[in-house]
Image (cartoon, rainbow, N blue to C red):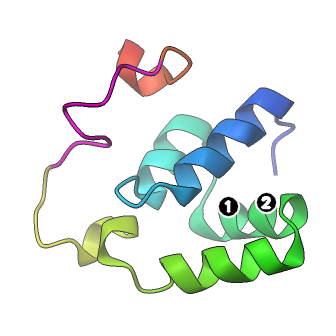
C-alpha cells in the first residue's frame, strides 16, 4: 500500500463510509483497490466499528459500480456542498 498522509487516510475512511461513493471512486482518487481499502479500514478502525462497516457495505449495490442499476451517477447528492479537499471535484 502506498504511503498515505493522515489527511488522505481520513478522506478514504470518510468515502468508504459514504453509501453512494463506490470503491471505484476511491481507486480513481487514491489508487487503492477494494481489498486495500478493506485492509486500511481494518487497521484504522476499532474492531467493532470495522465489523459494522463490513456488514454495512458487503454486497451493497451502491458501493460496487458493477452491481449498480445505473451506469452514471454522482459521487454525492447535488444538494451537498462542494468538498474542497476532494480532488475529484477539482477536475
Image quadrant where one finds the C terminus: top left
Write down the residue under mark 2: 40
Question: Which residue occupies 73% across, 83% down?
Answer: 51
Write down the residue under mark 1: 37
Say whether residue 3 is left or right of residue 60. Answer: right
* Residue 5 visible in this rendered orientation of the protein: no
Question: Which residue occupies 50% across, 84% down?
Answer: 58
| Range covered by the magenta-colored residues | 73-83
Question: Which residue occupies 82% across, 52% down?
Answer: 1
Question: How many numbered badges does the structure rendering display?
Answer: 2
* CA distance for labels 2 and 1: 5 Å
Residue 39 within the magenta-colored segment of the rendering: no
Q: Nearer the viewer, residue 33 or 47?
A: 47
Say whether residue 32 is left or right of residue 4. Answer: left
Residue 81 within the magenta-colored segment of the rendering: yes
Secondary structure at badge 2 equals: helix
Asked if marks 2 and 1 touch (Cβ < 8 Å), the reply is: yes
- Image height of 12 relative to 58, above or below: above
Residue 36's quadrant in the figure? Answer: bottom right
**Mark 1 neighbour class, 10 Å CA radius: few under 14, some 14 to 19, many 20 or more:** many
Q: Position of residue 6 (x, y in %)?
A: 85, 32
Q: Position of residue 7 (x, y in %)?
A: 76, 28
Question: Which residue occupies 63% across, 80% down?
Answer: 54
- Image height of 41 relative to 84, above or below: below
Amino acid at each position: 500500500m502506498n504511503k498515505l498522509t493522515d489527511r488522505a487516510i481520513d478522506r478514504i475512511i470518510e468515502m468508504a463510509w459514504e453509501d453512494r461513493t463506490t470503491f471505484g471512486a476511491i481507486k480513481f482518487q487514491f489508487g487503492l483497490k477494494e481489498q486495500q481499502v478493506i485492509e486500511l479500514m481494518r487497521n484504522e478502525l476499532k474492531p467493532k466499528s470495522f465489523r459494522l462497516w463490513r456488514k454495512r457495505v458487503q454486497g451493497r449495490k451502491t458501493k460496487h459500480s458493477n452491481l449498480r442499476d445505473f451506469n452514471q451517477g454522482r459521487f454525492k447528492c447535488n444538494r451537498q456542498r462542494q468538498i474542497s479537499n476532494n480532488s475529484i471535484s477539482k477536475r
